[in-house]
Image: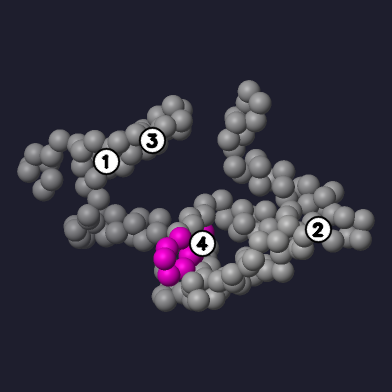
Amino acid sequence: MTCGSSRVSRSSILLVLALAAPVLQADDGVEPAAWRRTLERIAPSVVSIQVDGTEGSAVAGLRGCRSQHRINTPRPTWNPDIENPFDFFADRQEVPDNGEFDNAFKYQWELFLRHVAIDAPFIHDFYEGAKGVQLAELGLKSWAEQRWLDVPALPDAPAAARA
């Protein structure tokens, strides 16, 4: 995000919003509804992905997912003379976890240690590492140039290097 001539990170914006919350309260001590909705939308996680489909929508973050089926979505009539009676964020339901997931970094580290200690198979070879480095470099370039970039395929690794 650009603010004037300087770059502002999303985490900086979240910090400012969190610190400003007490200041932005109305005289009666109640936060304005727009402010509350802004915090509800961006504060739960730094990463959020919204998916809208014909049968409903979902918003997923690092620590949870909320969804709303099309049938449960209110159909308001736009009327500029009255306040909207619907709280669209409150109508979404938490998606239950369907399993217990271990820490991904810990899991990959354990796979690597098994590979080193007992020569167990390891799916992340040098070629996979090169693809990860390529993606990271393209991500930085995309951010610097403020545009989408294609990820070209790397040349196939020689069979000896893949073994």
Q: From the viewer's perspective, is 12 left or right of 147?
A: right
Mark 3 Cα within 10 Å, few/some/many (few <14, many 20+)? Answer: few
Q: Secondary structure under badge 3?
A: loop
Mark 4 Cα within 10 Å, few/some/many (few <14, many 20+)? Answer: some
Q: Amino acid at mark 1?
A: Lys
Q: Secondary structure under badge 2?
A: loop
Q: Which residue occupies 49% across, 73% down?
A: 69
Report if the CB atoms under discs 4 and 1 are less than 8 Å apart: no
Mark 1 Cα within 10 Å, few/some/many (few <14, many 20+)? Answer: some
Task: Please tell me which residue lies in front, 83 or 43.
Answer: 83
Q: Nearer the viewer, mark 4 or mark 1?
A: 4
Q: Secondary structure under badge 1?
A: helix
Q: CA distance from mark 4 to mark 1?
A: 29 Å
Q: Pointer 2: what residue?
A: 31
Mark 2 Cα within 10 Å, few/some/many (few <14, many 20+)? Answer: some
Q: Pointer 1: what residue?
A: 131
Residue 135 falls inside the magenta stretch: no
Q: Which residue occupies 72% across, 43% down?
A: 16
Q: Amino acid at mark 3?
A: Trp
Q: Pointer 4: what residue?
A: 59
